[in-house]
Structures are given as C-alpha cells and as structure tokens.
Image: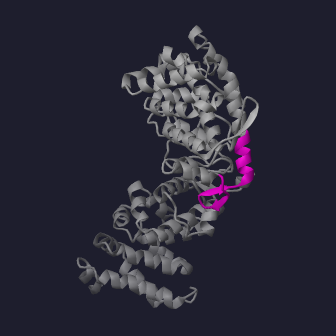
Amino acid sequence: SGLLAFCRASRGAEALDLALSAAQACAAHASAVVAMAACDECAGVLLLLRQSTKHFEAVVALSLVLTQDPKFVYQCIVHGGLLHILYLFVADSIFEAETRLEWPQHSRALAGELLCKLAADAVHGAHVSSIVCRLMPEIFLSTLAEDPVGTVRVFDTDHRNPELIWSAPMRAQLRSTLAELSNNALTTHAPHAQHATNGDDAARSVGNGMHSLPSAAVSSAEPSSEAAFPSDDGILPQPGASTECENKCRVADIPQGFSPPPIDYAELANELCVGGVYLRLFAAQPEWQLRHPQRVLSAILAAFSQLLQRRADDDAFAPLCTALLILLRSTPTLAGHVAALGFVGTVLAPVSSGSGANPKLRQFCVKAARLLALSAECRKKMLAADCIRPMLETIRTSPGLCVDAAGALTNMMESSDLVQKAISAQAVPTLLDLASKSTGEADDAAACKASIVAVLKKMVADRRCGETVRAM
C-alpha cells in the first residue's frame, strides 16, 4: 500500500514514473497483486486514468495485472474506476488542465481491453456487465474480447441491423452522459484518495442516483459472489430498448456498489430487444447471421415462457414467434438446443390447449412443432408430451393449419416410439377418415389431403410398427 500511495498526480511526473514502474514490477508476484488489490490506495491509481494522460498506458498495464484479483474489480466499481474506463473508451477527445486533447484510437482500445477484463471477472463480472449495458449496447462489450481496435471503429460508425442500432446522436448522448458521470466520480473520490491513509472511509454519494460504498467494506470483507447480480445469459438489457416484452429497460437491483440510471435513447424507444437482438429488424432481415444464435434462442424461449404464464395476447407473442421460426428455419440444429433447455413442451402447450389458445399463437406453435420434430432430441421430448391428439384435432378443426399439422406428424413419425403413440391415439382411423372427407374449406385441399396421406405412408414405412399400421 505504501508503494501505491506514491501513485498520485500530485507527486510529480518523475516520482509517478518511478512509482508506477515499481508497482508493475511488484505485480509480477501473485502475493503483491493480492495485497495491492485490497488496499485503499487503489482509489488513487484509478484517478490517474483521468488525471494524467501521460501515464495512461502505464496505469492500464498495471490495472490489467490487478484484474486477476476480484477485489480490484470491486475497487473499480465503488471508486468510479469503471466510469473512467468507460468514458475513456467512448471519448474521441478529452479535457486535461482545461485543454481539449484528441483521444487516439489506440488509447480507447486499451481502455476497452481493460473494460473487457473487468467484465470477465468470475465474481463481479456480471455486475460490471449490467452497469455497462445500462449505458451502451452490449455488443460493444462482446466484441472487445475479440478485437478492441476494431470495436472502436464500429463504435464510431452508424449501424442499423438486428444486433446494433447506433447513430451519431446516440454516441453524443453517451459521451455526454459518461463525461458527467466520470467527472462526478472524479470530484467525489479525489478527496477520498488523498486522505485514505488518514482513515477517511466515509461513504460518499456520487450524484445522478449513484452511490459509493465505504472503502472499509473493501478491505474488511470481500462481497459475496452469490449476490443477485444479473447473469450473462443473453438477457442483459439494452439501453433504451425493452426486454422481456416490457416497454421499459429493467435491470435487477444491484445490492452492492452503485447503479447508474439507464440512458433512454430516442432511437430505441419502440424497439424490443431480446438476447441482444432487435426483433423488428431481425424479422425484416431474416438472412442476418447472428453472432450468438444459441444465446438469442435461449432468451426468446425464456421470454415466450413468461408470456404464456401471463396469458398475454397475440400481439405480445408475435415478435418472439417470428424470431423463433426464423432461427429454427435458418439453423435447424438449434432445435436440439430447444430440447436441451426443456422448452419443447412449452412450445407445444398452446396446441394442446385446443380452442382455448389464441388462434395466431396456436398457428405459430403448429409451425414450430413441425420444425422441432425434425430433431431426434425433440422427438424424444415429445414422447412425454401430449403431441399426437392435438395435431389430429388441429387437422380436423383448422383446415388452414392442416398442411403444417400433418407435416409435424410426418416428422414425428421418424420415431418408432411416436408411431406407437400415434397408434394408441387412434391416429390411423382418424387420418383415414379425414383423408376421405371433403377438405374444401382448406386453402389448398389437394395439399391438405396429400399431407395426411404422407403421415400414413410414414407410419406404414416404420420398421417396428409398419405392419400393424398396414393391417389397420
């Protein structure tokens, strides 16, 4: 701690150079990293990010090593370091000694690299991510791990696609907000850093609804890793965009540190973002290759399940249903992921409820069932669900869904166990009866009848049960 006490802008450039060099040398030893990460003087090192651009690279290099210890990540959260790092990533120019300086891309990339390391921390990384995603699109945090310099270029460019809506006014709004937050944190924590060795551990409010914790909390006990931080499961909120089918960005309350208010971007006011994807644009650009389709699928299924529990209307389901069908059609292997997550029964539930389900929702679920039944994993899950009778009832009562319902049954009949289940459900006489009756109400009567015949042919072709079906 004595060494870090010399890492102050007030010490003079030469003394600061020596102190930072010595600190970096000591940081080569694990025990020194643990000691430095836990001491109060870390607050002064974090202030240097804003106070001395000349030493910025040295401070970042030291900080990157200290991120090996979760206590340092916590220090960044409670002493404003995270805000300084964010500001130095997004800014294209900064003020130092009342002089505006151009802030180069390589320095911004270094700040981004440090931000990425903080977000990757096993204990507090989800906390960091939740704060970042209140302020800017999560995709920037994701791409920093792959290409910090490239992410800076993406940040400085306008975009309008399913994974990123970004414009010059949004950049200006973010830069202005972070400049204010960083300046407030600088003003608040500078006195604390100067008097840390005198035992000044009082909690200080930062402004704009943000609060720091007493520094004693850092040195006396490390925060529990079981705190209710939002997990990085793909349902992180996008600033200004609605998640979980709400019209307002929501983040779970953060029990430790501080939580900046989310930025309300006007461009995102009417956008629904789930799993980092803007569903309206995804529906308009279905050919778009998502970076993390499995994560998006998980988020969509979770939101779909929540809407079912709320008994929401068709309009609420529409964007989720459209996105799910696009994913299953463009990447059929994702059906196995639906089975692994245990959502096959959830998707089939509206079909099983028959006339009690919303008509449009039922139509979607029939189409989804047809795609899911292509997967062996999903067919195994369907054995435990009521999947045969609802499809037969759909063919009988909803001529417009006949082709999709029969197609779902045809795909299900790839499984001998499901063929046996269909026999038990009296599918053969039912389908024969339906095929013989007039289907004039259907949009395409011939296609409907052909789809029914295809189910019967598939059952007859089954090695285990085919003879039984033929005899019927």
Residue lying at the far top in this picture: please name it: 198
Residue at the image position 50 percent from the left and 80 percent from the top:
402
Q: Position of residue 139 (x, y in %)?
A: 56, 51
Residue 308 visible in the displayed image:
yes
Q: Position of residue 236 (x, y in %)?
A: 56, 46
Residue at the image position 39 percent from the left and 28 percent from the top:
28
Question: Which of 442 and 353 lies nearest the eye of the viewer?
Answer: 442
Picture quarter with the C terminus:
bottom left
| Image position of 418 (left or right of 464) | right
Part of the protein shown in magenta: 156-176
| Image position of 26 (left or right of 309) | left
Tell me if residue 171 is in the magenta stretch. Answer: yes
Q: Is residue 320 above or below residue 470?
A: above
Q: Position of residue 198 (x, y in %)?
A: 59, 8
Hey, which quadrant is residue 51 in on the image?
Answer: top right
Residue at the image position 51 percent from the left and 20 percent from the top:
218
